[in-house]
Amino acid sequence: MFEFDDRIAIGVSGGKDSTSLLHILAKIEREYPKASLVAITVDEGIKGYRDEALKIAAENCRKLGIEHVTISFKKLFGYTFDQMVSRLKRKADVKQTPCAFCGVMRRKALNIAARDIKADKLATAHTLDDETQTILLNIFHGDVLRIAKEKPVTDEVHPKLVRRIKPFCEVPEKETALYAYVKGIKFQNTPCPYASEALRNDARMIVDMMEEKHPGIMFTIFNSIERIRPALEELAREEGLGECIECGEPSTDRVCRTCQMRRLIG
Ligand SMILES: [Zn+2]
């Protein structure tokens, strides 16, 4: 996942997964004088939630001596997420949950911030649990080719798209939590007030239930997808990556999903 001289950006939300990853990468990075590490926190603008997490992220970075940058929805998209949600609530025709909007926008914000600091790689703390849930979720959504794109190490597909890596993709969430507790790492424990992605919650329930009954099944799901990934990638290759006509960011559609969402928000 890493080269000895990589400039690594890491998305740090302040939760247990990303804070544990920050500590582990900081420890490894010390051994590589030519590598550098920068933490990025996306400030969505969620009152009573993100402000606390920002402090925790900043405190961890300070302790570890890691450079920390924040990027806000307000600056990038013109509205805080709280403002976006209240605008969306007034529109009856919008079917997506707040999580769907936030996920797409946060992803974009992370990429822009990582590109700004000239990062070679962008590390996120997605765990084995997240990965297996996402696999099921993409099937539930009928968006199976997305599985090919959500791989542990993305290829260099576009000069504006920083390569993404998921160092925790084979680490169960229980272990990242255990690491944080054992190391006495401070992290945010309160869930997001908008957490309402019904389908993901169901996917999580299914995976958790299966894992409890059949330990190791998350690894089996993950490894099965790794095995058929080349075939999926072959199928997905036909969808070329261009640039959004509105914002110029990489996109498979003429207008990227973020800009489509911004139109909906109005
Ligand atoms: Zn766009």
Image: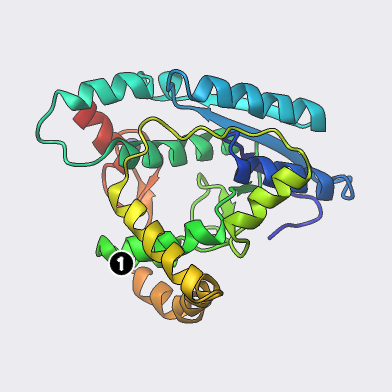
**Relative to 244, is 188 above or below?**
above
Q: How is the rendered protein coloured?
A: rainbow
- In the image shown, does 190 or 250 lie closer to the viewer? 190
Q: Residue at x 58, y 55 (%)?
A: 173
- In the image shown, does 21 or 10 lie closer to the viewer? 21
Q: Residue at x 77, y 32 (%)?
A: 66
Give the quadrant of the N terminus.
bottom right
Report whether residue 167 is seen.
no
**Which quadrant of the frame does ligand 1 lie within?**
top left
**Relative to 149, is 183 above or below?**
above
| The residue positioned farthest toward the left in the image shown | 92
Report whether residue 136 is seen.
yes
x, y percent for residue 19: 66, 40
**Count of number-bearing discs:** 1
Q: Is mark 1 within 8 Å of ligand 1?
A: no
- In the image shown, does 180 or 141 lie closer to the viewer? 180
Question: Badge 1: few (under 14), some or many (20 or more) residues near its Cα, within 10 Å?
Answer: some
Q: Which residue is mark 1?
A: 139
Q: Secondary structure at mark 1?
A: helix
**Relative to 21, is 207 above or below?**
below
x, y percent for residue 8: 70, 44
Give the quadrant of the C terminus.
top left
x, y percent for residue 122: 61, 46
Q: Quadrant of residue 62?
A: top right
Q: Quadrant of residue 61?
A: top right
Q: Amino acid at mark 1?
A: Ile
x, y percent for residue 129: 51, 59
| The residue positioned farthest toward the front in the image shown | 213
Q: Residue at x 53, y 19 (%)?
A: 51
Left or right position of 170 against 243: right
